[in-house]
Structure formats: structure tokens, C-alpha cells
Amino acid sequence: MRRAVRSTRAWARAVAPGALPDFLIIGGQRCGTTSLHHYLAEHPQVRPASGKEIQFFSIHYGRGERWYRGHFPASMAGRQSFEASPYYLFHPRAAERAAVTLPQARFIALLRDPVERAYSHYLHTRSYGAEPLSFGDALAAEHDRLAWALRAGPDSRAAHAVLRRFSYAARGRYAEQLERWFRHVPRSRIHVVRSEDFYADPATTYAEILRFLDLEPYLPPRFAQHTRRVEWGAPPREVRDSLRAYFVPHNARLAELLGWPDPWPA
């Protein structure tokens, strides 16, 4: 309902649309983007969009740039605007679209241990009743689910629903997603953060992000954790171990791509 109201208001504001955003948080899902969105929105030089997850470059691209501008304030000297849509990192066409529409923008990606991210994603989907399967069965069904959804292309209604809900393992293959972004956007305009570093030392990570964005140093009143879903429990050990082994080559590919040490050792 909130998103429908926000979209209607964006159409109304499109008569006198705002400026395009200066930077985006592009993902990943369940990696700390909601907390980072809150911290950046509190910065005195930053003005956020009308809400989190505008999803223009993924779901709503057909509505046009004028609709997108309707979610942002008018340009103001010394101020930057932004939005955060975690689906952008994963959506097959978001990088190319963002590069064309925002040729000078900067982008921030947060990457969490893909095993922990996958289970968090599963709990998120279960919490609103969209996932009837166990975690192990959902992982086993993922390939066929995604293949079925993509038959009509990544912008079909079925694809959006399935890619967002059931991409538990696929979203953790970070290297292939970043490589797609790097094909369209210079690496110098993409800042990649390991979520565990953000959780462990939010002040230092936040300061590094501000430098990347050319924003003045600032500390929020507190670094509270913001999340839409409370996580509980853990997956069965055999499922966790299998998934950990699955991600070994993908994590190695990411480490080589970014020049990182192994980010999440098996």
C-alpha cells in the first residue's frame, strides 16, 4: 500500500519533477542496505528519495524518467539525493539502464556472507507466506523456478516475482553481478563493502562511504540496526555445509575480481 501511494504521488510531482539522484545503494538484499539507507539519510548534505526501493531500473523502468524524477527533491547546491533498491545489483538489466540514465552517479554495493544472506532471504520470503518449501527443498528447486520465470524475459511480471523471492543462491554469486555492473559503469564509481565489516565497525565503514561520495565527515546520533525482518534459527547443518561448498568457487572469483582476500572462508 505504501508503495502504491508513493507511486501515485510521484506521478503528481512529475508535473515539476525533481533532479535525478547523485548516488544509489544497489544491493545486495539482506546485506545491511536498510541500515545504510537510514545512516545516509541522516547526513545534513543528503536528501533521500520519497522512500526506500523505488525500483525504477528493475521493475518500473517502463514508467519513464519523468516518473522516476518525481521521487526526488529539486536540485540544491551542496546537497545530494539518493535511493536504495537492493534488487538493482541482481536484476539483469539494471546496470545498463542506470549507466545510461545516471552517467555521473556513484553506486554502493554491500555484500554479505552468501550462505548467511541466502538463509536470511529465505526467512524473509517465508515471513510473508510466499515460500512453502523447507530451505533445502527451496535451494533444490531454485534453478527450475528461475528458469521458468525467465522464459518471458527478466521484465515479465512472473520474472520479477520469482527473481525477487526465490533467488537464494543466485544472489550470492556476487562476482557475476559485479562484472555486469563493471561492464557498464567505471569501477571508480562503484564502492563495494563487505557487510560484516559494516556490522563490526559501522563508523569506519560509514566514513569510507562518505569519502567515496565526497560528503563531509558526519556521525549519526547512533548506529542502530534497521531491518524489516527479524532473523531466527539456523538452517540444518548439512544444508549449510552444502551451500558453503557451493559458494567456494564463486567467492574465489569475487576475491580475484576485487583484489580481496577470501572474504568468507569455508
Image (cartoon, rainbow, N blue to C red):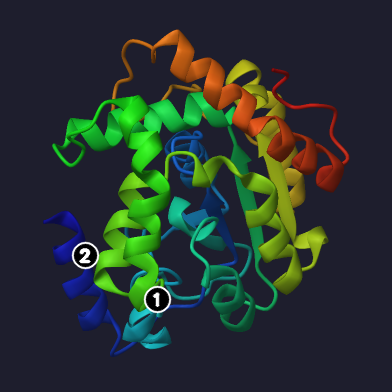
Q: Nearer the viewer, residue 62 or 114?
A: 114
Label 2: element kind: helix
The CA distance from mark 2 to mark 1 is: 27 Å
Left or right, 26 with reference to 60: right
Asked if the residues shown at circle 2 and circle 1 are in contact, with their CB atoms under 8 angstroms apart, the answer is: no
**Percent from the top left, x then y, of residue 67?**
33, 82
Residue type for callout 2: Arg
Q: Residue at x 17, y 74 (%)?
A: 8
Residue type for callout 1: Gly
Residue identifier under label 1: 153
**Percent from the top left, x then y, of residue 46?**
53, 54
Label 1: element kind: loop
Q: How many numbered marks does the figure carry?
A: 2
Of the image marks 2 and 1, the number of the one nearer the N terminus: 2
Q: Residue at x 61, y 70 (%)?
A: 77
**Percent from the top left, x then y, of residue 242?**
54, 22
Residue identifier under label 2: 6
Left or right, 211 with reference to 71: right
| Quarter assignment of residue 262 | top right
Q: Nearer the viewer, residue 141 or 74?
A: 141
Q: Is residue 216 at least partly visible in the picture?
A: no
**Percent from the top left, x then y, of residue 143?**
43, 50
User: Crowding at label 2, few (<14), some or many (≥20) Cα neighbours within 10 Å?
Assistant: some
Above or below: residue 217 compared with residue 161: above
Q: Is residue 239 at least partly visible in the picture?
A: yes
| Quarter assignment of residue 142 | top left
Foreground tag (2 vs 1): 1
Q: Residue at x 21, y 65 (%)?
A: 6
Above or below: residue 80 compared with residue 111: below
Q: Residue at x 58, y 53 (%)?
A: 45
Left or right, 149 with reference to 167: left
